[in-house]
Image (spheres, rainbow, N blue to C red):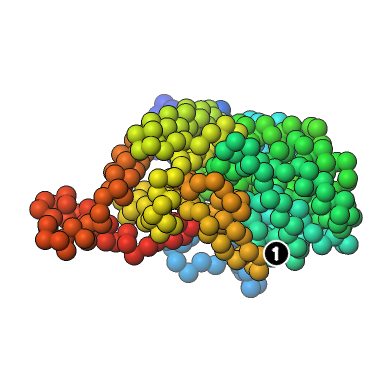
Amino acid sequence: MNGDSFSAGEQIVSPAYIRQGREARRGHEQLIRVLLEKGKCPQDAWDESTIELFLHELAVMDSNNFLGNCGVGEREGRVACGMVSRRHYRLIHGIGRSGDISAVQPKAAGSSLLNKLTNSVVLDILRTAGVRTATSCFVVPMATGMSLTLCFLTLRHKRPKAKYILWPRIDQKSCFKSMITAGFEPVVIENVLEGDELRTDLNAVKSRILELGAENILCVHSTTSCFAPRVPDRLEELAEICAKYDIPHIVNNAYGVQSSKCMHLIQQGARRGRIDAFVQSLDKNFMVPVGGAVVAGFDDSFLEEISKMYPGRASASPSLDVLITLLSLGASGYKNLLTERKELFAYLANELKTLAAKHNERLLDTPHNPISLAMSLKNMNDKGASAITQLGSMLFTRQVSGARVVPLGTSQTVSGHVFKGFMSHSNDYPCAYLNAASAIGIKKQDIDLFIKRLDKCLRQCRKEKPVEVVASGAPPTTDEDITELTKDLTASLHVEAEDLD
């Protein structure tokens, strides 16, 4: 309500009470005003009533919510179901215009303001997380793979002769397919083994540049966040190589925002050499539903070119989700989550190391990977790949999600390219292993329960299959035995490890 409305209210209810209510509303409005003025994530979390008030204020600025609106076009923000309308806070028009995802819509001042503000708040978080010199970013309603494709398509206009993308190998299908979808030929750079870690082969990168010719290379496509024993690429050295040969550099920072080490690598790479853009997932870093990513960089004009490459308008849902989340956390709340994740990474590493020793295995030494860990499964190698994938199935049927088991010798063809040792990021990694990660939002009880269930599965793998025990005339005698038998029989159906990720 405005001042006139409050004054009118004083004719109905005691003026003292109305003045008290007016001051309460001013408290909400003050938070909103500061957000709009500074464009930064508020230090302290907002309560839900402030967030909802803000979103409703934005919604009434869109034409579909005008009281006297008369829409006679094909896109008037009409929604058939009230539940759907409420789910989107009546912000129906989406973001952008037909020629630019970042452009302002005349019909939707509220949605446009939401879009601009979200980009500003996310940029503030990226800077706070470690990439202090990032100058621009925008939220795109596509996951990481397609957002990388958008970057490659933008570079096509800058380098029309280029047909190759140099890509230090990481066994994740969307990374590879993002280049294929854009119409380029990935040049896979195999990693080198240093101790237990798989690291970037810089000499191979230089050799391929000289062999193919810098002008024929669209970009170097590097990676920060990845499954151990693969560790983040040597971003600083790659950035220097790209600067030397005048080759663009796109970084896949999928879930790297939550790691100060990954963000530091990007910051240093931009300082020492060349990084044109870095792309990160919304769901992995900000705990929102899948469907969005953030494209960020150090050159406003290049980021603007990428945003204009997106055809048509776009869904505002990812922008809305991340803005609500960051307002509900505040900068301090998000920082606390990052600190907690880092502490729990050390706890997970210690617990896995202890468990590995108990089963005559070991935690692989991957100090350059700040999120993912790997435990060897050497004692299961003799039983073959099926026994190792069986372990993954057993964990999954016990409601352990996200853990990956990687057997030796698995090959897979992705878009015509054969990857030997697929999922291990290497043709011939020395041992099979199991992955687990300490990602943002994980809790100590998650780790404790995972360790308990993994211990039980590893012990079970040393025994005969439960179905053989039943066949020999020793049926299960307790409810727990029956439950375990059911789970192991289900696991025997063989759930592929890569489909569980």
Task: Compare residues 262 and 85 and report the one nearer the observer.
Answer: 262
Residue occupying the point 57% across, 48% down = 429
Q: Position of residue 160 (x, y in %)?
A: 87, 62
- Looking at the image, the residue that sits furthest to the front is 382
Above-or-below relation of 236 to 217: above
Above-or-below relation of 45 to 212: above
Task: Compare residues 13 and 435 and report the one nearer the observer.
Answer: 435
Would you call the spot at circle 1 few (<14 residues within 10 Å), some (14-19), or many (20 or more)? Answer: some
Left or right placement of residue 444 versus residue 261 in this view: left
Q: Position of residue 183 (x, y in %)?
A: 75, 66
Q: Position of residue 448 (x, y in %)?
A: 34, 35
Q: Position of residue 301 (x, y in %)?
A: 82, 47
Q: How many marks?
A: 1
The kind of residue on which mark 1 rests is Ile
Q: Which residue is mark 1?
A: 180
Q: Is residue 5 visible?
A: no
Dot 1: what SS? helix
Q: Is residue 425 visible?
A: yes
Residue occupying the point 66% across, 65% down = 417
Residue occupying the point 75% across, 35% down = 236
Left or right placement of residue 141 versus residue 304 in this view: left
Residue occupying the point 67% across, 46% down = 191
